[in-house]
Image: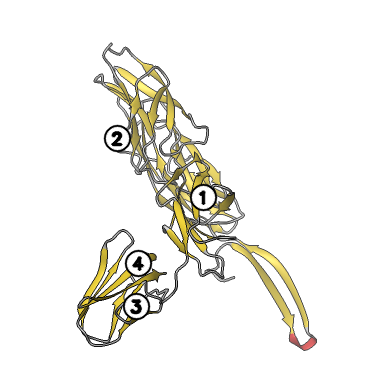
Amino acid sequence: MPNSLPGSYYRIICTVEKYKIQSTLSVYVTTKPSVTLLGNTVINAGESTTLVIRSNKSTPDVNKFVLSDGSKGEVYSSGTAQVTVSPQKTTTYTISSVTNGCGNGTATGSATVEVNPPSERSITVTTITSSSGYGLCTGDTIAIGYKTAGSFSAGNQFTVQLSDTTGRNFRAITTIPGSNPIKAVMPTDLVAGILYRIRVVASDANTASSAYASPMNVSQKARAKFASETVIFDGVKNPKVTVLLSGGGPWYYQFGTDASVINRQSSVPTDVVELFQASPSQYYRLFRVSNSCGNGIIDSPSIVKVEIVTATEPHVSVYQATVAPNPAQDVLAIRSEDGTEKSIRLMSQNGNVVRTIKTRKREETLDIRDLSPGIYLLHIDAKGRKATFKVIKQ
């Protein structure tokens, strides 16, 4: 079998041409394992924590690993496994070996567990729960349970801290004063799929603080918006509108008119929707969007208007000119009736001038490749004689 084959399902086809005989066998080809060790953290003396081993390949086999301290475990195809360690001093762990039915694989990464020295007081996080009930999501309020040892002053303040993506550098996050469990708000700038650590610290000096034993995987709330404020209808084909989604799918959203609301699901971040029974000047709205984090955020533009546009017919036709192609994607060609000096301006719908030239040429071009899709107005002024065209950038 070729070494370059990724783990997947294949078909082996055997053919005997002389007798026109063919036989097919479906097989799953597995590969040697590849895993990565993650989970930098900080703990108090005498405590345990968990490290994460991530499988980097899809295989049907069980991958067995051994850590540098002799700890053993198993991780399955395209999954993760946690292993508990209890270092007595600051220790950096690596993976000594990883094997499956195909033999020895490759292991990368390391995890450093920093052990705090003994101190007068200590704090250990014991539980983390989300008030939304959807897991840990950006923007959510979470409750952090903790236990303490030693005596704290009356003026002591507890604050929740969150690690960066390395798990070693911590920053304070918005903490809501109160009793145990203490509450905090998850920042909105966290990256989905990255592991973070949480701990509670005290304002009293000589206080050791241990991060929660399990690293957190954070999800982002869903967001949705239309790609443009208008959609073009030629009166024949149903117009299509693009909905831009972010924050992690699959997404569930509602859109439509005030009279008719449509429920839709998408597994891709750019969802193109055909509008049936659309009519000129009709408005479509985004009503709500959600994902595994519950209800999300509707961004602007949240309303799209259906417009009918005649391709090359000018709205004001004192100066004779044509603009083609229209709609256009890359270049606009402007042909005028004579060589009179003229100014040509292309403006967005909010009045911003995005292109401007002065010319005597009867044929001129405008490069519009870097412009956003939408409707623009092209103005031609030839010494007082004017023409205006509505231009569609695709």
Can the viewer see residue 20 in this picture? Answer: yes
Q: How is the image coloured?
A: secondary structure
Whichever of labels 4 and 2 marks the residue nearer the N terminus, that label is 2
Q: Residues within 10 Å of mark 3 (few under 14, many from 20)?
A: many
- Between circles 4 and 2, the one closer to the viewer is 4
- Between circles 2 and 3, the one closer to the viewer is 3
Give me the residue at 50% from left, 40% from top.
Answer: 295
Q: Quadrant of residue 116?
A: top left
Whichever of labels 3 and 1 marks the residue nearer the N terminus, that label is 1
Please, what is the three-letter code of the amino acid marked with disc 1?
A: Gly
Vertical placement of 339 versus 107: above or below?
below
Q: Residues within 10 Å of mark 4 (few under 14, many from 20)?
A: many
Location of the N terminus (image quadrant): bottom right
Please, what is the three-letter code of the amino acid marked with disc 4?
A: Tyr
Residue underneath mark 2: 171
Q: Is residue 90 left or right of residue 142?
A: left
- Between circles 2 and 1, the one closer to the viewer is 1
Residue underneath mark 4: 376
Q: Position of residue 72 (x, y in %)?
A: 52, 41
Give me the residue at 44% from left, 41% from top.
Answer: 218
Could you say whether the residue bearing mark 2 is in a helix, strand or loop?
strand
Residue placed most toward the observer, 201 or 332: 332
Q: Quadrant of residue 150?
A: top left
For residue 257, which numbered disc appears in the image? Answer: none
Q: Quadrant of residue 140?
A: top left
Q: Position of residue 198 (x, y in %)?
A: 38, 32
Residue underneath mark 3: 332
Vertical placement of 77 versus 332: above or below?
above
Whichever of labels 2 and 1 marks the residue nearer the N terminus, that label is 2
Vertical placement of 142 versus 249: above or below?
above
- Between circles 4 and 1, the one closer to the viewer is 4
**Inter-mark Cα distance, 4 to 2:** 46 Å
